[in-house]
Image: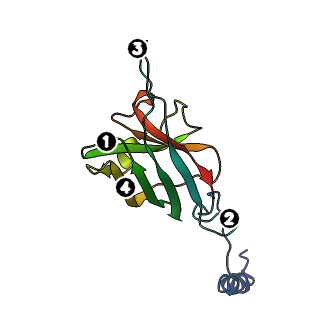
Amino acid sequence: MRLKNYFAPAFFAGLASACASSTPVSTASTSPSPTASVSTSGKPLRWTGSLQPTQQRTGKVAPTGQSKAFGNVTLTALDPNRTLVDISLSTPLQETASLRWAVLLGRCGSGSLPIVGIEQFPVIEVGNNGRGQVTGEMSLTLPEDGTFHVNVYWQGSQLSDVMTCANLKKS
C-alpha cells in the first residue's frame, strides 16, 4: 500500500515563506570589531610622548655620556590598521643621517622587541642642522592599552644603539 504525502506541498510552501521573510539574519562573529581607531571616549586613539636624552650604553668599562637629543612623538590611529606618525627630533648630529625608530613594549630602557619589524617604520631624515622629522601614514595597529615607548637609534636596533627614548601615554 502506498501512502500519499498530502502534507509535503504545505510544508515546502511554509518553508519558502520563512526564507523570504524581511527579518534580517544576524550573524554572531567571534572576531573582535574594528575599534582600534577610536578610544572609549569616542576620540581618535592617540599615543604621545617626549623624546628625552638617554644615557649611552656600552659593553666596556668606560665613562658614558648622555646624548643631547630631544623631540616629540605623536601616533594617531586613522583606522584599525593605519597610523599617522609625527616625530620631530633635534640631535647633536652635524651631518645628514637617516635614523631608525620603533615602538616597543614597556618603558624606556627595557630590552623588549618592536611591536612590528623595525624595517616597517619609516626612517627619520636628519639634515646637517641636526633636526629631523618624519610625518606620514604607516601600516600599524595601535594598541588600545598597555605600556609602550619609542626608541630612536643611532644605528642598528639594539638597546646600546638608542639615541633617545619617549615613554608613550594615551591621550
Amino acid type of the residue tagged 3 in the rendering: Lys
**Earlier sequence position, callout 2 versus callout 3:** 2
Residue that label 3 marks: 60
Q: Nearer the viewer, residue 130 or 57?
A: 130
Q: Secondary structure at mark 2?
A: loop
Amino acid type of the residue tagged 1 in the rendering: Leu
Residue that label 4 marks: 133
Label placed on residue 93 = 1
Q: Residue furthest top?
A: 61
**Earlier sequence position, callout 1 versus callout 3:** 3
Give residue 36's quadrant in the image. bottom right
For the point 70% across and 67% down, the residue is 41
**Earlier sequence position, callout 1 versus callout 4:** 1
Amino acid type of the residue tagged 2 in the rendering: Ala
Q: Nearer the viewer, mark 1 or mark 2?
A: 1
Is residue 132 depicted above or below 78 in this figure? above
Is mark 1 in CB contact (under 8 Å) with mark 4?
no
Amino acid type of the residue tagged 4 in the rendering: Gln
